[in-house]
Image (tube, rainbow, N blue to C red):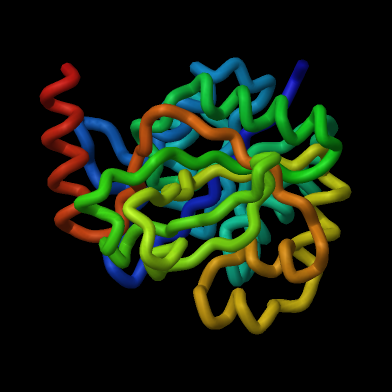
Amino acid sequence: MDFSVIVPARLGAARLPAKPLADIGGRPLIVHVLERARQAGAARVVAAVDDDQIAAAATAAGFEAVRTGECSCGSERVAQAAAQLELEGPIVNLQGDEPFIDPDTIAATARLAAEDGGCATAAAALAAQTIADASTVRMVIDDDSNALYFSRAPIPHGSDEALAHIGIYAFASRQLLAKLTALPAAKLEKSERLEQLRWLAAGQRIRVLLVSEFTAGIDTPEDLAAARNRHEQRN
């Protein structure tokens, strides 16, 4: 099954400015993420960017880059790029701060969306000592592994078990992606600052792939330092 991966990246992240260009082991963060997508076997791997510096970093490493306009979330940026390229088949939005995601997770999430004809994401068990960490998005699912809710608060209440959301979404088609990102922002989305709540509020099912390892994104200078240490240990 052919699928495409689009990595959205913007220069002006509030908590970690110029994050896509942050150096990890001699290469920009965005390049590490793009390489993970290539290792997953994607037919096309594209950086969807808002700045020429990020585009240059991606193309210098041998990847495609597409300039996009103003976007309120990463999936809107991915949708713009997918429309420009007229991509066919499943499309994966791999968030640009996931340099350690397992390539098998990327491919499996794409397959899940394709098989379901809808939308899919991934999650992993969250260690008990980090359940209260506000930087990690938690989620709850039903007995059939469909997403019920996403939150920045510890959920479910009173439980020592939690699922952590991994920064990836897959869509069965460019048309579905366009439809979901064109929806008006939902109240819960605005409250939680989580774009996927827009789709749930509109009745879209989100299938959830459960994986064994949680890979945290990079949002702060502390996260970046931890990522650099992890990279050094692995290499």
Q: From this viewpoint, is residue 55 visible?
A: yes
Quadrant placement of the N terminus = top right
Q: Seen from this angle, which residue lies furthest front?
A: 158
What residue do we see at 74% from left, 70% from top? 201
Q: Position of residue 9 (x, y in %)?
A: 48, 52
Query: As drawn, is 47 to the left or to the right of 216?
Result: right
Q: Based on the displayed image, in which of its 4 quarters is residue 77 positioned?
A: bottom right
What residue do we see at 60% from left, 50% from top? 141
Q: Position of residue 132 (x, y in %)?
A: 27, 63
What residue do we see at 47% from left, 49% from top? 165
Query: As drawn, is 79 to the left or to the right of 88?
Result: left
Q: Nearer the viewer, residue 46 or 72?
A: 72
Query: As drawn, is 218 to the left or to the right of 39?
Result: left
Q: Nearer the viewer, residue 107 or 62?
A: 107
Quadrant placement of the C terminus = top left
Task: Name above or below for residue 65 compared with residue 68.
Answer: above
Q: From this viewpoint, is residue 12 visible?
A: no
